[in-house]
Image (cartoon, helix red, strand yellow):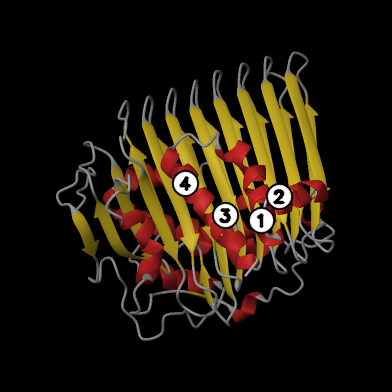
């Protein structure tokens, strides 16, 4: 087990079936739907402290007071939610007995994997945990639900401090209904040698999932974390509203990779936000491949001098998928730097929307920021929108941005076909080359290979 201070007392996988870690119930979904009563039932089922129950109820009040986004809102002009019926979903109180698909665990459990620790959550409950190497004293890898009991002072201090319920309709819904979640804490001057991983799996038909990740790196700490969400395709639609809060302390370094691979039945709404201290470094990798409709906010606040951010994102959309990414590089302090590159490949009748903003506040002199979005269209019906923006209040900065939207060059396809490749093979090679400059910047080899493999697998299926 991982004790109160995070030291590993075992190795190998742990399957969890006790009442503390896995809530057993006949009906796995609440009967109240989304309501104040459902929030109270969820909090009572987890035997939460009074402060957390009140925190959830305050978030529910914010949710009720916040209008549902429409295309009249600037952020949502290109994303239509009229087909979304929230009343067809219900929060999960307990997962079914069916285990997570082993195929999803394979990349993390392979003998040659470089993952040092793994947390597996299914429909909000912890179902497996593996620690392959002893964690340093004080390092914590556990569920957010368990951290409330074992590390209440940390959770109470940081929960909602980076991504408050007031951030929007769906972040408020997550704050009210978040389930097991993930909690990662690295104390001062501790470097976690091997990457840690969190896998969130959806199994219950028609479920509404609310994953919430809270990552805290104290001063001088270092960590690599992979967070993946996955499910198989299902007939019944499902809902995911996720939140990630990343706290990167002074002179700390976080390498964070988030991979979204939901089934095509999923409505996905994500809100991920990081705050960086003095001389903090964040390397952020994002892969978006799954879901029916996916709307994600990716924001970083460079709050102290010397903070630096490097973000790369890869989107691959096919069929009728819709991806909408809104990014923010928010420079609050002077002498900070950020570099964001997003690339999307869109085929069939799919659509990708990218809206990126560099915001430099008046006091943030000597800011160095760059924003780039490139889009490749593989069919006549595919569509990509790119809206890079600058809001600069300081007068001593270097900020640039750029965007491209273009179809595949037919001469490239022709050249590859003269070398013996089929049209589909040529297209797959062009797509791989399109993503490669971006993938080359991912700082950890294992993360690069996982993203490459995921992109290649989807391209092969889309041509199948």
Residue 144's spot in the image, x, y percent? 37, 54
Residues tagged 2 and 1 counted as in contact (Cβ below 8 A): yes
Lower position in the chain sequence, tag 3 or tag 2: 2
Residues tagged 3 and 4 counted as in contact (Cβ below 8 A): no
Lower position in the chain sequence, tag 2 or tag 4: 2
* In-image side of 352 versus 181 (left or right): right
Q: Mark 3 points at which residue?
A: 455
Mark 4 nearby-residue class (10 Å; few <14, some 14–19, many ≥20): few
Residues tagged 2 and 4 counted as in contact (Cβ below 8 A): no
* In-image side of 157 versus 16 (left or right): right
**Mark 4 or mark 1, which is nearer to you?**
1
Place residue 461 in its image quadrant: bottom right
* In-image side of 105 versus 415 (left or right): left
Q: In which quarter of the image is the N terminus?
A: bottom left
Lower position in the chain sequence, tag 3 or tag 1: 1
Mark 3 nearby-residue class (10 Å; few <14, some 14–19, many ≥20): many
User: Residue at 81% of width from left, 47% of height from top?
Assistant: 411
**Mark 3 or mark 1, which is nearer to you?**
1
Mark 1 nearby-residue class (10 Å; few <14, some 14–19, many ≥20): some
Q: How far apart are marks 3 and 2 (CA)?
A: 20 Å
Place residue 253 in its image quadrant: top left
User: Residue at 38% of width from left, 36% of height from top?
Assistant: 223
Q: Name the residue under label 2.
A: 416
Lower position in the chain sequence, tag 4 or tag 1: 1
Q: Which sits in the foreground, 106 or 62? A: 106
Lower position in the chain sequence, tag 2 or tag 1: 2
């Amino acid at each position: 087990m991982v004790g109160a201070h995070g030291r590993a007392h075992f190795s190998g996988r742990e399957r969890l079936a006790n009442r503390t870690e896995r809530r057993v119930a006949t009906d796995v979904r609440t009967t109240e739907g989304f309501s104040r009563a459902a929030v109270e039932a969820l909090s009572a089922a987890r035997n939460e402290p009074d402060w957390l129950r009140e925190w959830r109820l305050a978030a529910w009040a914010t949710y009720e007071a916040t209008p549902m986004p429409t295309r009249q809102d600037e952020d949502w002009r290109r994303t239509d939610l009229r087909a979304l019926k929230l009343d067809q979903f219900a929060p999960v109180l307990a997962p079914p007995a069916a285990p997570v698909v082993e195929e999803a665990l394979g990349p993390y459990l392979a003998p040659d994997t470089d993952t040092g620790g793994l947390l597996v959550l299914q429909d909000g409950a912890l179902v497996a945990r593996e620690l392959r190497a002893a964690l340093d004293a004080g390092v914590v890898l556990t569920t957010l639900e368990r951290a409330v009991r074992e590390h209440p002072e940390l959770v109470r201090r940081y929960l909602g401090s980076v991504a408050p319920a007031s951030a929007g309709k769906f972040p408020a819904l997550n704050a009210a209904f978040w389930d097991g979640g993930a909690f990662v804490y690295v104390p001062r001057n501790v470097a976690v040698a091997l990457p840690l991983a969190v896998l969130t799996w959806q199994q219950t038909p028609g479920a509404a999932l609310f994953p919430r990740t809270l990552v805290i790196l104290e001063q001088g700490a270092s960590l690599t974390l992979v967070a993946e969400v996955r499910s198989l395709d299902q007939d019944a639609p499902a809902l995911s509203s996720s939140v990630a809060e990343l706290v990167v302390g002074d002179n700390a370094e976080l390498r964070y990779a988030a991979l979204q691979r939901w089934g095509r039945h999923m409505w996905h709404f994500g809100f991920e936000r990081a705050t960086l201290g003095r001389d903090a470094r964040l390397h952020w990798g994002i892969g978006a491949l799954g879901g029916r409709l996916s709307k994600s906010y990716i924001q970083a606040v460079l709050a102290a001098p010397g903070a630096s951010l490097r973000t790369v994102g890869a989107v691959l959309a096919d069929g009728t998928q819709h991806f909408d990414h809104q990014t923010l590089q928010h420079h609050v302090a002077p002498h900070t730097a950020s570099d964001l590159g997003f690339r999307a490949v869109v085929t069939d009748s799919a659509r990708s929307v990218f809206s990126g903003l560099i915001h430099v506040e008046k006091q943030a002199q000597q800011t160095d920021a760059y924003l780039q979005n490139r889009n490749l269209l593989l069919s006549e019906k595919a569509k990509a929108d790119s809206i890079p923006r600058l809001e600069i209040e300081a007068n001593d900065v270097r900020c640039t941005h750029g965007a491209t939207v273009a179809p595949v060059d037919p001469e490239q396809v022709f050249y590859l076909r003269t070398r013996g490749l089929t049209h589909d093979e040529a297209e797959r090679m062009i797509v791989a080359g399109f993503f490669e400059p971006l993938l080359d910047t991912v700082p950890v080899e294992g993360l690069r290979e996982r993203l490459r493999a995921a992109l290649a697998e989807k391209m092969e299926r889309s041509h199948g």
